[in-house]
Image: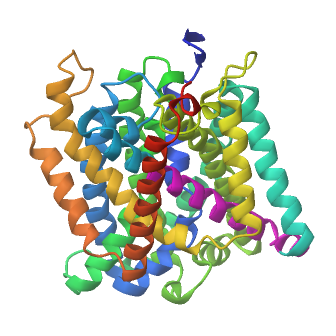
Amino acid sequence: MTHTNGHLVRAVGLAGLTAISLNGVIGSGIFVLPATVAALLGPASMLAYLIAALATTLIVLCFAEAGSLFDRTGGPYLYAREAFGRFIGFEVGWMFFLTRLAAAGAISHAFASYLGYFWPALMTGAGRLMVITALLGGLAWLNVRGIRYGAWTVNILTIAKLVPLVLFVSVGLVAADHSRYLLVALPDMEKLRQASLVLIFAFGGFENASVPSAEVIQPRRHVPAALLSAIGVTVVLYLLIQAVALGTHAGLAHDPTPLASAGRNFLGPWGAGLITVGAILSTGGSNSALLLVGPRILYALSEGGQLPAFLARIHPRFRTPHLAVITFALLVWGISLYGSFAELAAMSAMARLLFSVSTCLAVPRLRKRLPEPQSFRLPGGITIPLLATAISLWLLTGITPSQARAGALGLGVGALLYLLHRLLPRSLWKT
């Protein structure tokens, strides 16, 4: 059933919202992370996944409660603006947008590279240009045509990306040498911290489901359910993938394509091809979610009067923020082809912590400001928000100097844009 609310259309149900969240988390990273973690911890790497899963779950719980309070577009931007004011809200929304932009650019490159496994000409030059243009142009067209088409694409690609990974796990668990696991002895604590930090960032992306609430059916109920379902599926799948990789690939720690090599070990030559297909579907699915969510942040900032008004325009027929979709797709296309987005990628580490901290701290304030009935409320008062905030701040101490500089640059640009918004005529920002 389709419902309307103002100009946007409520057409995304629980399954679609869960798929958006899953696509945010399960991207290209899981195809290389098993080697990264194994290089740090060896057979004890499963412990890092458990720590990262626990920490991420606390943050997800805060997003779930905050999401249950709103039925408008915006996610972390909306929570921060309502709790802490327009400036903090804008900075959070701006940094959230930059993370989606950087991720979409990086994933577009990865998509072309994985396709190049089967057709090497697509990895460079005109071939790469053709692939990236077709991917972004096709996804933008679907998202302009309607939220239903964008959501259906995400749903289909989510199922398609999970099939190879589930097959990898199902066969691999039987073939694995279980003596290679080490869960009792404690590893080096500094290496455990490094591995957990990498994985907590790898679990990020779930927050995509909190953004398009104005187009979600019963968002106050479905946003918390989607977030918790997605993180539950991701934790189980990530643990099993690491277990299979450890148990089937002796040289895991030093392999740049760990899952493809592990698949080749127990599935034969076609195993590497299967995992590569999974990577193509995974990166395509991740970008389909980003092309749905990224424009909605631009729309929310514009609707809030903090970006030019044209970004909040709704297509009269398709009921989508079509100009925001086109703008976002063009920006991603530009950095994918012509720009270096290394700094944007580094910025995403600090940005993710910023909107995690702001959302966790917003929960107690939103309870007081919006004391209406909630479909989801955390037990234990402020205990979980405080624990989640402490974890996020602890992670902040682990960012590199280059990440800190990139994050400060992003915040500085955001502050200048906010000042520009205050100085320019208000007619420019009115929707």
Q: Is residue 167 left or right of residue 390?
A: right
Residue 64: x, y in percent? 31, 35
Span colored in magenta: 94-123
Identity of the residue drawn at 21% across and 68% down: 394
- Above or below for 207 versus 215: below
Can residue 215 be seen from the camera position used here? yes
Task: Identify the image quadrant of the N terminus.
Answer: top right
- Above or below for 119 versus 219: below
In the rendered image, residue 120 lying in the magenta stretch gets the answer yes
Residue 21: x, y in percent? 49, 42
- Above or below for 125 versus 87: below
Colouring convention used in this rendered image of the protein: rainbow
Identity of the residue drawn at 21% across and 22% down: 370
Can residue 175 be seen from the camera position used here? no
> Which secondary structure dominates the residues rendered in magenta?
helix
In this rendered view, identify the residue nearer to me: 394 or 94. Answer: 94
In this rendered view, identify the residue nearer to me: 210 or 102. Answer: 102
Q: Is residue 234 left or right of residue 168?
A: left
Residue 188: x, y in percent? 23, 87
In the rendered image, residue 295 lying in the magenta stretch gets the answer no
Task: Identify the image quadrant of the C terminus.
Answer: top right
